[in-house]
Image (cartoon, helix red, strand yellow):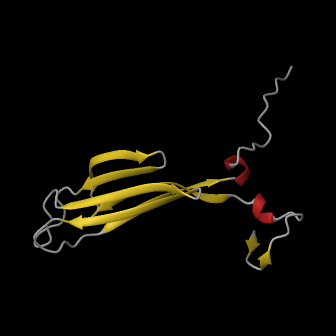
Amino acid sequence: MRGLLGPVDHKLPHFWLRRPHRYLAGYHFTLNGTEPVLLASTNVDFHRSRSFFTNPRIGGYRTEIAPGLLVVSLARSIEEERLVEEWEIDNHGPSPARFTFMLAFQASFEDLYQVRGFHGPSARIVFGD
């Protein structure tokens, strides 16, 4: 393991273990601010999946894209213990399509020990006389 200033000595306590960290809790994507339509989704094999989406009607005057002209393909796989996603957008319309593809991320702010399954002291209920 390496830190910003070089190798990290595993024998010394490090303050980063006592600080909370952010983790990617989820995300969703939109096309021009609209939710895409799921066409199909399947697992290709044990560690791969494939999903296909299309667009609803998006845009406005002179920028309208009719429903079903865009196909968004999402391929997910686990490679070397990491999640890898490959996005591909195909335009099946007669002219170029202009739109905004947006990913909105959700972060979780958890303590490192809670994420790893170590729990701190549990709450106790004390009854008085």
- Residue ranking furthest to the top: 129
The number of callouts visible is 0
x and y percent of residue 65 in the render? 15, 65
Q: Give me the residue at 29% from left, 60% from top.
A: 72
- Which quadrant: the C terminus? top right
| Occupied quadrant, residue 67 | bottom left
Residue in front for this viewpoint, 110 or 1: 1
- Residue ranking furthest to the front: 45
Rendered position, 91 above or below 50: below
x and y percent of residue 114 in the render? 70, 47
x and y percent of residue 77 in the render? 47, 55
In the picture provided, is 80 more to the left or to the right than 121? left
- Residue ranking furthest to the bottom: 5
Q: Give me the residue at 18% from left, 66% from top.
A: 59
In the picture provided, is 67 more to the left or to the right than 9? left
Q: Give me the residue at 78% from left, 43% from top.
A: 120
Rendered position, 91 above or below 76: below
Q: Is residue 48 visible from the viewing direction of this image?
A: yes
- Which quadrant: the N terminus? bottom right
Q: Give me the residue at 61% from left, 59% from top.
A: 22
In the picture provided, is 28 more to the left or to the right than 128? left
| Occupied quadrant, residue 42 | top left
Q: Is residue 36 visible from the viewing direction of this image?
A: no
Residue in front for this viewpoint, 102 or 74: 74
x and y percent of residue 98 in the render? 21, 73
